Amino acid sequence: MRKALGWLLALTVLIGTLGTTAGAATAAADEPTDIKDRLLSIPGMSLTEEKPYPGYRYFVLTYTQPVDHRHPDRGTFQQRITVLHKDVSRPTVFYTGGYNVSTNPSRREPTQIVDGNQVSLEYRFFSPSRPDPADWSKLDIWQAASDQHRVFRALKAVYPANWLATGASKGGMTATYYERFYPDDMDGVVAYVAPNDVVNDEDSAYDRFFARVGTKECRDRLTAVQREALVRRERLEERYAAYAAGKGLTFDTIGGLDRAYEAVVLDYAWGFWQYSLLKDCDTVPADAATAGDDALWTSLDTISGFDAYTDQGLAPYTPYYYQAGTQLGAPTIHFPAIDRHLIRYGYQPPRNYVPRSIPMRFRPQAMRDVDTWVRHHATRMLFVYGQNDPWGSERFRVGAGARDSYVLTAPGMNHGANVAGLVADEKSLATARILAWAGLPRATVDQAKPLARYDARLDARDVEREPALRP
């Protein structure tokens, strides 16, 4: 019986994979014309809800995916997808943030530029897109890229025009990995603020960044808050314990409140530069040594977040920390301006943020492979970084073998860097290339601009904030 069930699951996945090809070959007059009906005619696609938005149709869907793309007979799970539908004749932007997907309508920058459709995919193992039971060995960059590949093949017949992949931070990494494993799927890639930790144990680029970023006055303010928070560790930890008890927060995964407290403090400078701008230094206590406990607590909580390293704060991000500790790598920085005796643990490894019941083994070849491929084979890829974003310290670069690919930096910007924040000539170049990759009439560089008017509700321009040290 179990063997028969396994073959039935395999057949379901196979039908979903081949349905696009078969449907394209046998398209007939009785094919559904309404976009919802067309989407739901795809084997394995189910509707969760449709939400109205002027000028669009917006669908929240689930799609049946194999837990293991190498062995599709070994179980399936439901992966959440959203579709912002404009017109089947328009280009389509394939977006992933690398974490959960929002179920509210939004439009990423490339979607606005090309005035197109947008398909957004939740990353595997982020709830509710998690197999049950969860075989964590099937959470890797190839399996996730294969999720995208199957979704693309399923939807290409519905949206036959050009496709672009995009994402920011971990989503930018995801778009890059997808291109590496399935380079024939997309017509272009726009990866924002994507870290590239090629050698996990070599993190000196981050130390150089923190020694030079912003102004000395701002750096000194941030360091002073961190140092003073460690000096006042005992009484601020008493406050932390009361805070946690009041909210029912626990610290089993990280190994205790003391470890969590230090992690919050050490994240402070990184979190500031990731999500704030130089002008925001005015919000940092000017003299930490004379600042009250309330001022230090509030600043630390605002920038780092005291919930971040509790069991409850870590649990939704277990898939990220698992990947960081098995393939992606994680940064380590030093704190030369803080007395060594004040720091007990330093930057802790991802292993400390994942329940011990989940086995982990780091595979250093994964990022080296992707980095080598991008340097020598990148085609129609655009990487955008922020000058003051610590995650850009280790970034993707393109070499002599790359074609029509670019790495651009937005001056003064943080982890929310985008094409709109580039200097004028680079902004025009990037916009022109995105339009060209989308298969739209070529615009001269000096005339290139987004085709869709800015919509304050639809066009997200804020930093995609992830609490704690996460891209």
Image (cartoon, grey):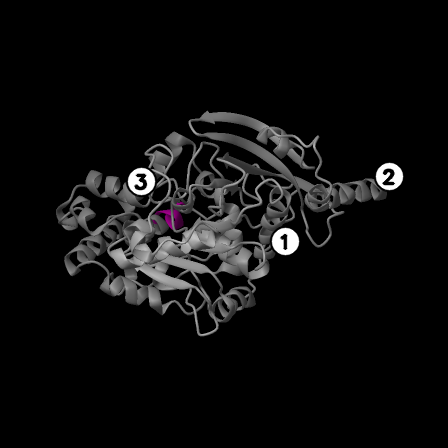
User: Mostly what secondary structure, the magenta segment?
Assistant: helix
Q: Earlier in the sequence, mark 1 or mark 2?
A: 2
Secondary element at image label 1: helix
Q: Label 1: few (<14), some or many (≥20) within 10 Å?
A: some
Q: CA distance from mark 3 to mark 1?
A: 39 Å
Amino acid bearing label 1: Ser
Magenta-drawn segment: 257-261
Residue occupied by mark 1: 137
> Which mark is first along the chain, 1 or 3?
1
Name the amino acid, label 3. Glu
Q: Which residue is mark 3?
A: 238
Judge by depth and name the residue closer to the eye, 352 or 190. 190
Among the two numbered marks 2 and 3 on one chain, the one whose residue lies closer to the N terminus: 2
Q: Which residue is mark 2?
A: 1
Residue contact between numbered discs 1 and 2, judged by CB atoms under 8 Å: no
| Camera sees residue 126 | yes
Point 46% across, 49% down: residue: 255
Q: Quadrant of residue 184?
A: bottom right
Mark identifier at residue 369:
none
Residue 460: image quadrant is top left
